[in-house]
Image (cartoon, rainbow, N blue to C red):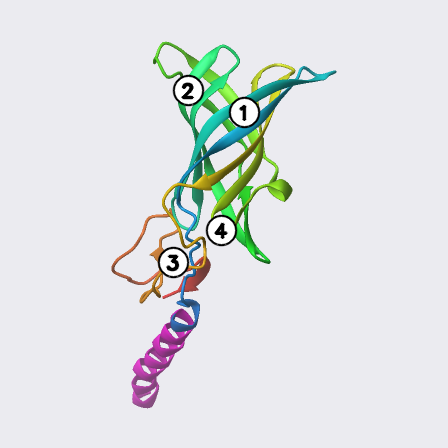
Amino acid sequence: MMRIFHKIPMLLIVLCAQVNMMMAQEAKPEVVPDVWGTYEGEATMELFDGTTKTPSGNKRMIIEISKGERSLTVLTLKDVTVGQYEFASIPFKNCYLWLNKNKWNVEANDNLYDKVATKDKQHTVWLSGSIYKEESWVDKEGNLTLSFFLFFEEDSEIHYVFKGKKKSSPTGIDHVNAYKKTPEVFDLQGRRVSKIGKGVYIVNGKKVVF
């Protein structure tokens, strides 16, 4: 009986060693594209009322790409006019950047569907929108092409095709961030954990039992 009890701590040590080895394998360097920043350019617009498409001219536009929660990216349209309303910012909050040859494609994990306050704070408008991922990317020279749609009324849709360049990155997207020394650990409620106890955690996107 005593031999069994002596074996239990050894089994725990082996189990912890296996978990630590798994975490070390998961904690690979995180390569983050140097595309976060502000892009200035021009967007062509096309109004679609459900039956016909009408060109609506060109408009100067600013688009900001920034780091979001966890591995997500936020894409924010700046100073946009939709219909009769002006907005200081319209964010697509849950976007991904994925490498496709020499370009980083921009993909919205969730379509926009939210109440957005107008620039003068006088109105709150329901807006919906989507990003056409096949035609949205940042190339290695720091040029952004973004094809997206905004819906502001029933059967009213505006299609934008933005082409612009990053303001402050002469190096394009060849730069990568430093290696991450420790893995990101979250509990099942999505909260970051600094001290790990017994239980189930999310380590770099995978469930691990401690």
SS for callout 1: strand
Image-based side of 11 in relation to 139, left or right: left
Measuring 43% from the left and 48% from the top, which residue is drawn there?
35
Image position, residue 43 (x, y; %)? 54, 28
Taking the image as drawn, is residue 119 in sight? yes
Q: Which residues are magenta?
A: 1-23
Image-based side of 2 in relation to 127, left or right: left
What amino acid type is highlighted by mark number 3? Tyr
Crowd band around label 2 with a 10 angstrom C-alpha radius: few (<14), some (14–19), many (20+): many
Q: Which residue is mark 1?
A: 128
Q: Which residue is mark 3?
A: 201
Q: Quadrant of the C terminus?
A: bottom left
- Circles 2 and 3, Cβ within 8 Å, touching? The answer is no
Q: Main secondary structure of the magenta part?
A: helix
Image position, residue 60 (x, y; %)? 48, 26
The image quadrant that residue 163 belongs to is top right
- Circles 1 and 2, Cβ within 8 Å, touching? The answer is no
- Circles 1 and 4, Cβ within 8 Å, touching? The answer is no
The image quadrant that residue 134 belongs to is top right
Q: Which residue is mark 4?
A: 141
Most extreme residue toward the bottom is 3
